[in-house]
Amino acid sequence: MMSCSRIFLRNGLSSRSFVMPAACSFSGRGHVRSSDVVFIQEWSLPTRRAKYSAWTTASFSGPKSHHRSLTTTSSPEISPLSRKDQPVRILYASQGGTAMLFSQELEEALGDELGKECTILSWKEAGENSPQEVLTPGEALHVFLTSVSGVGEPPDNGREFFQWIMEQEPVGGGGVSWNEVEYTVFGLGNSKAHPNHYNVIGKALDAKLKALGAQRVLELGLGDDGDCIEDDFDKFLENLLQLLRDAEEGESPPEAELEPADEQTVVQSHSQDAKKDDSSSPRVSCPPGVSSREDGTRLASTKRPTIKLLTPVTDIVRENLFHLQGTPNQFYPSSVKEWEVNSNQSLAPQGGDTALHEMKIRIVPGQKLEYETGDHLKIYPRNSQVIVDAYLERLEVNRHSIVADEDQTADNYPHPKGLTINETLTHCVDLGATPSPSFARFLLGRKDIDYRTDIALARRTVIDLLGEQGPEKKIALEDLLYELPPMKPRYYSIASSSLMRPDEIVLVFRPCKYVSSRGILREGVCTSYMLHQAAAAVGSVVDNTTTSSIPAVVNSNPGFRLPEDPSSPIL
């Protein structure tokens, strides 16, 4: 069985690849044509997923280049807005937090540029409440944002709402006057990692709403995380803003007149803050010991709610966040456990920075755990302390200051409260992520950037852009914590069999290291974290009782299985 695991790895079938039925072809990292896509294989999945398959197997014909398009067809049916003054209702379903972040950016842009009244609801909130009350025909423009989970399923926080919509009938379905519902959809997917179910939820939702008779006012937007999803969303956002501007003006201006004057005004007001000397920027007074400045103040954000900080009480930085389990600030899902790392070694005879490594993780005796070869181990990493320190240098706060544990809903704070700034940056924020287009413009203090080339493809981070402003350039804590995406778990295919190794899980991984187009060395967040754990597991034992451990959970992957018949070829 172990030899089979190695075969999987050499074939490139990673946590982002899935077994294809015999009737389908798969050639390494090649693309599947959109006209030949089978979004979910019913032969190997349970009934619930078969239901999703029936909803998402519509044919989205066209060349592969349409994955980068903002439209589903060459001539989508677009309806004019019925009211120019109606508010905007943003409804999102997010698995890793990106759709939620985009929703917040959308709300901010609509408010800043057009003064639009906006509300944000997750699909979970929409499903728990009455969907009929959320979908208000003639009273709001509905903007849906959704990613894809698993093997072509809606995100966990959107399953109920998605299922409710997909089961409705056109005439009076669900008690909604569908022909008066105005909407647009932005989907989040990855055409390279998941070509066989690229953006299927967004596409299916858009098609279903149109079939119900709802009024599509803007083409379906497709965000591709395999290329530059931030750029895709930026284009979708600009199209939506232009649609609403045109509605307020009563007609579309000639193409030659589409100057970005309004955009420049808003960005300038934001970018001026970035250009101004920090001494003239807004400031907030701090409790004793919180500010790193002699005057006891720190930079304040002009865009985000002020985060209340408390005086430090300790300089200890927790290795994980299990102490939050069962509290309102819980960070890990309840199923996540602390796993002991038994060993971690290079599989290459002479090692090397990017050599394959084998990590063995101990299963606690008596722990009820079932896994199969091909399942994932979902790991919650932490940022390197070196990177955290670099960001702390750009803030004007004591690293051990505590985020006050107050009302969670009033300020829409995106991370657990009660942690120190150091702990928040270490565990909760993806410091290696590229900033959004609007945030990148703010940090650089200008609008004229080629985001895709200069930021996304170059994999530049917030710390890179701050560095261009000089070594003394600071940033408000609120701008950093609200703008950067939350830390996401990483998935690693299990490379062992529970039949042969019932007391441990084996992972095989290659450290991710590369030099960006600007000559900067980059390292993967999770593989660097795993290498660090390896060093602790091999050499460091504290009081002979504590070894290295990682927060993780086994994630079933029924779409990636060996054939039941051992005589079936697998190559």
Image: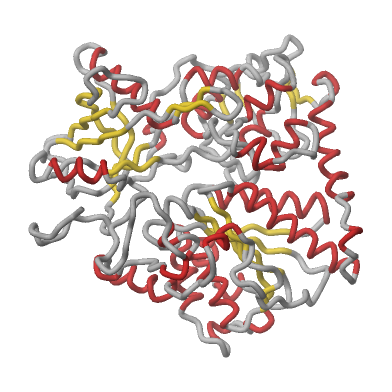
Q: Compared to 387, does 14 lie above or below?
A: below
Residue 541: image x %, image y %?
24, 14
Residue 6: image x %, image y %?
20, 40
Q: Compared to 497, does 117 lie above or below?
A: below
Instruction: Determine the residue positioned at 24% across, 27% down.
Output: 341
Residue 567: image x %, image y %?
8, 59
Is 86 left or right of 182, judged from the image as shown?
right
Q: Nearer the viewer, residue 104 or 74?
A: 74
Instruction: Determine the residue positioned at 53% across, 62% down.
Output: 123
Q: Nearer the viewer, residue 43 or 536?
A: 43
Q: Nearer the viewer, residue 384 or 448?
A: 448
Is 54 left or right of 71, judged from the image as shown?
left
Q: Which quarter of the rendered picture does the N terminus lie within?
A: top left
Residue found at the very far top of the displayed protein: 294
Instruction: Determine the residue positioned at 64% across, 53% down.
Output: 233
Residue 301: name its quadrant. Answer: top right
Residue 176: name its quadrant. Answer: bottom right
Q: How many marks?
A: 0
Residue 348: name its quadrant. Answer: top left
Q: Nearer the viewer, residue 157 or 53?
A: 53
Q: Compared to 87, does 296 lie above or below?
A: above
Residue found at the very far bottom of the displayed protein: 171
Instruction: Determine the residue positioned at 25% across, 49% down.
Output: 375
Is 436 left or right of 372, judged from the image as shown?
right
Residue 284: image x %, image y %?
76, 25
